[in-house]
Amino acid sequence: MAFDLILRGGRVIDAAQGLDAVLDVGFADGKVAQLGPSLSAEGCRSVIDAAGRIVTPGLIDLHTHVYDGGTSLGVDAMRLFHEGAVTTLVDTGSAGAGNWKGFREHVIERAPVRIIAYLNISFAGIYGFSKRVMVGESGDMRLMAPIDTVAVAQANRDMIAGIKVRVGKNASGFSGVAPLDIARQAAEQAQMPMMVHIDEPPPMLADVLARLRKGDILTHCFRPFPNCPAGPDGRVLDCVLEARSRGVIFDIGHGMGSFSFAIARTMLANGFPPDCISSDVHALCIEGPAFDLLTTMSKFLCLGMPLGEVVRRATLEPAKALGRDDIGSLKPGSAGDASILTLDEGRFGYVDSTGEALDGAHRLSAAGVVLGGVHHPAGRRVS
């Protein structure tokens, strides 16, 4: 068959197919068409030499904020696409029912990159988030809008994957678990999962996890003390183990203050890796400490997680969390998305959300990206 594009001779890592091999990837009509050694280039419009590179399914960042211009924490989705080789950006609660229309019409529908959203249970979304103004939207119970949230979510199932709620001292003040209880009611009515942010107590992590269902996502799952997932004895908390056993999904959501190297080491040593690796990139952490998804993935490489497992948690696992079988894989017929990466070896400095520094030997960098079967060269990498 004739291909529109071939990625030639890259190391293909695709957890969905159990692949880690040097192969060609052929694209046709905006989809993955075929994988194999030495695919015929006869009639092909473009052949990209991927030798020495890593080729993965298009990266999925399960936690971002890309309502650029509509919220104070939004960043440009195309920057994350070009510089980070991310083909699916999941915006988690930037918009609520009250400003969803603007997000959809002015950002999502205009962006070439795929954007999927979790709708905030707060009518106003995340509206007071900057270096000088920080107002947790869940702290004002007048903004909890279950009826409007369900209506908007049901009318926009093509773009909305679930309901987002933020709880903790910073996000919800002293509202406790009430915003979460309201979000759960809305999620059940809409027949959607939730993504739940947690920061410092109140409420306590155990009280939050007790309310999560199979398929719900706890983001900031390796956050530092307090409300971290491990006890002072170095063991994973029973409430965390029990939540995973019933199908709660644990997502990193690095962000500005939500990822600790110390906690990550403890959790990995206990055989408790995250289900998904995400950046929680927004205006206050895009210049550090989070930067982007590739930086967060690189940190896990430097913490000892094998490359294939890191890739899995930024491709297949977030696709499963979203209930999408058309992304997160390079199976023929899948969306024609791929990330072309370089694995650099050397000495690279990383910092977590607590200020702890890590001198790592690995760094993943963007070498190019394919979206809908069209190749785009990598942009400037933020370092």
Image (cartoon, rainbow, N blue to C red):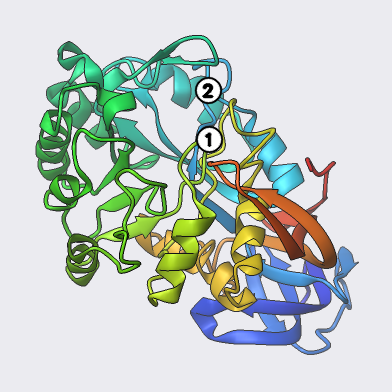
Coordinates of residue 306 in the picture (x, y in percent)? 60, 77
Amino acid, disc 1: Met
Q: Which residue is mark 2?
A: 73
Asked which secondary structure carries label 2, the reply is loop
Find residue 274 and report its image quarter: bottom left
- Residue 178 in the image: above or below residue 249: above
Asked which secondary structure carries label 1, the reply is loop
Q: Is residue 234 left or right of residue 307?
A: left
Q: Quadrant of the N terminus?
A: bottom right
Coordinates of residue 168 in the picture (x, y in percent)? 27, 32
Residue at 53% over, 71% down: 312
Q: Are marks 2 and 1 in contact (CB under 8 Å)?
A: no
Q: Which residue is mark 1?
A: 256
- Residue 339 in the image: above or below residue 353: below
Q: Quadrant of the C terminus?
A: top right
Q: Visible in this render: residue 337? A: no
Find residue 43 and report its image quarter: bottom right
Q: Is residue 53 left or right of residue 225?
A: right
Residue at 35% over, 21% down: 125
Coordinates of residue 61 in the picture (x, y in percent)? 53, 50
Residue at 37% over, 53% down: 221
How far is mark 2 from mark 1, CA to CA? 11 Å
- Residue 20 in the image: above or below residue 26: below
**Residue 286 tag number:** none
Tell me which label, 2 or 1, sits earlier in the chain. Answer: 2
Coordinates of residue 379 in the picture (x, y in percent)? 83, 43
Residue nearest the observer in this picture, 264 or 364: 264
Amino acid, disc 2: Leu
Q: Is residue 114 left or right of residue 3?
A: left
Query: Badge 1 local density, few (<14 within 10 Å), some, or many (20+)?
Result: many
Query: Badge 2 local density, few (<14 within 10 Å), some, or many (20+)?
Result: many
Residue at the extreme front of the image, as rendered: 233
